[in-house]
Image (cartoon, rainbow, N blue to C red):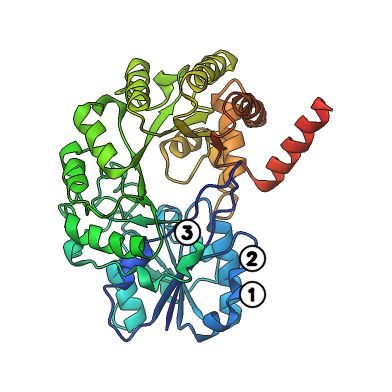
Amino acid sequence: MLLGIQPNSIFSNLTLANSTCPVGLLSIMTQLSKKHNCIIFNEDISGSVIDNNLGLVEKADDILLSGNSGNIFRCIEIARHCKAMGKKVIIGGSEVSLTGPQFIKDNPHFDAMVIGPGEDAIKALINNYPVPNNVIENSNMEATSTIDFNPPFVPLEFNKVKVDYSLLWDLRKYEGLSYIWGADCAQSRKRCFFCGRLRMGIGNRDANTVWSELKWAYDHGIYHYYNTTDSVTTNLSHFIEFCNSKPDDMTKDTHRVFINSRDMNNDLIRALELLNGVAVIGVESFGNIESSGKMATTNNESLYAIKKLCDSEIDIILSFVYGLPNENYNTLNTTEEKILELITQYGSRIKALHLSPLLITTGSPAFSKLMSIPHIRAKYSTKKVPYDVIEMSNDYFENFCNVSRNECIERIFILRDKIKRISPKTSIAAKGILNTEFNYMTKRLLSQVM
């Protein structure tokens, strides 16, 4: 039996969003021999995946973990438990791929690590045949002279992937599903090694196949969906094709999809209406757009897209980042004033706002910028990986912003309260805020009110 685990992020949201099942590992497992019984599930927010599922873990041959900046410390904890039980523990994911072999040198609970695409590596590791060159095994790590951090792409027959949602552990606990149709992320060769297959010539899965999978879930009471690979982002015609393939008898579903404001037109509106879509727009900043990395989209284009969507009665989610380079009180004031104006005008259509302090993750452009400072690079050269993302973020704020990370978190909480008074039903969420920070800030602001 093979047990795949995707731990929860260590970060909290200000308000909990709908739970969405992971699909990445599931789609990989469907490529394996039928002799493998694959169980994939998310860890309960309040529980321990080891303690609550001890029987499954004991039966597992291999434990597969996917590490990112949000869950990497939990992955290490799980590996420690599983290794003590005599299990083989393998880790992959963007955090590990970008950190390199130093990761398992510092964390010997892992037997092997996978850099980059994982399909062939996973099949080799669990079937006990020679592993490809993007796998580093702890036992012979010292013999590894060079590491290819950008390994040659080995094609996966993407259109033959079959996602069987019936394999999900306790489907009833989820309110939604993520799904894979196409892939087009521009960062695919730098950070995320799963969602770049369109750019690597794989293309889209057959839309009718995807809809048949979603229809099975729909018939089992799942009505909320998230397009894992944001296929609308770069190719509107493909997105429209996908929407036109939707079964006529799926009417109660909703789909969360990212859009680019500059692509706003009537065709996109019609596609979103057909999909029962919730449009997600990464505005990032109104007051500091020149530092947001979204210079291809202007404030006016974002405002036009918001107006067009709301006037068309399409719900939207807007995301903003606190702590872009050169952030200061004036830039934050400008952004917050515009947010309050939008909430006042379109509050009934703004389903959620994501207000997040900038979080520095390994391999990101901000990480590279931070490590270009000599004394910062010297500081982290003495630390074990993975680096503490909050410590890195605080260092970034200190060196590149005129406001601190703590000040930004406080402003997020204050703005949240203002928004709630105007539009109580709008959900406010933030990633990169720890539970301890959430509790402290809540008590602090409550004491000021009282």
Is 283 on the left-hand or right-hand side of 409?
left
According to the image, label 3 marks what residue? 67
Q: What secondary structure is marked by label 2?
A: loop
Q: Residue at x 36, y 21 (%)?
A: 307
The CA span between labels 2 and 3 is 19 Å
The CA span between labels 1 and 3 is 20 Å
Give the crowd class for mark 1: few <14, some 14-19, many >=20 residues within 10 Å. few
First in sequence, mark 1 or 3: give its number: 1
Q: Are marks 2 and 1 in contact (CB under 8 Å)?
A: yes
According to the image, label 1 marks what residue? 51
Q: Residue 174 location, x and y as percent?
A: 48, 60
According to the image, label 2 marks what residue? 47
Q: Residue 241 sits in which quadrant? A: top left
The CA span between labels 2 and 1 is 8 Å
Give the crowd class for mark 3: few <14, some 14-19, many >=20 residues within 10 Å. many
Q: Amino acid at mark 3?
A: Gly
Q: Residue at x 60, y 73 (%)?
A: 50
The quarter of the picture where the C terminus appears is top right
Q: How many marks can you see?
A: 3
Q: Eyeballing the image, is 65 above or below 383? A: below
Give the crowd class for mark 2: few <14, some 14-19, many >=20 residues within 10 Å. few
Q: Amino acid at mark 2?
A: Gly
Q: Eyeballing the image, is 137 above or below 380? A: below
Q: What secondary structure is marked by label 1?
A: helix
Q: Amino acid at mark 1?
A: Asp
Q: Residue 442 location, x and y as percent?
A: 73, 37
Disc 2 vs disc 3: which is toward the camera? 2
Of 101 and 327, nearer the camera is 327
Is 159 on the left-hand or right-hand side of 88?
left
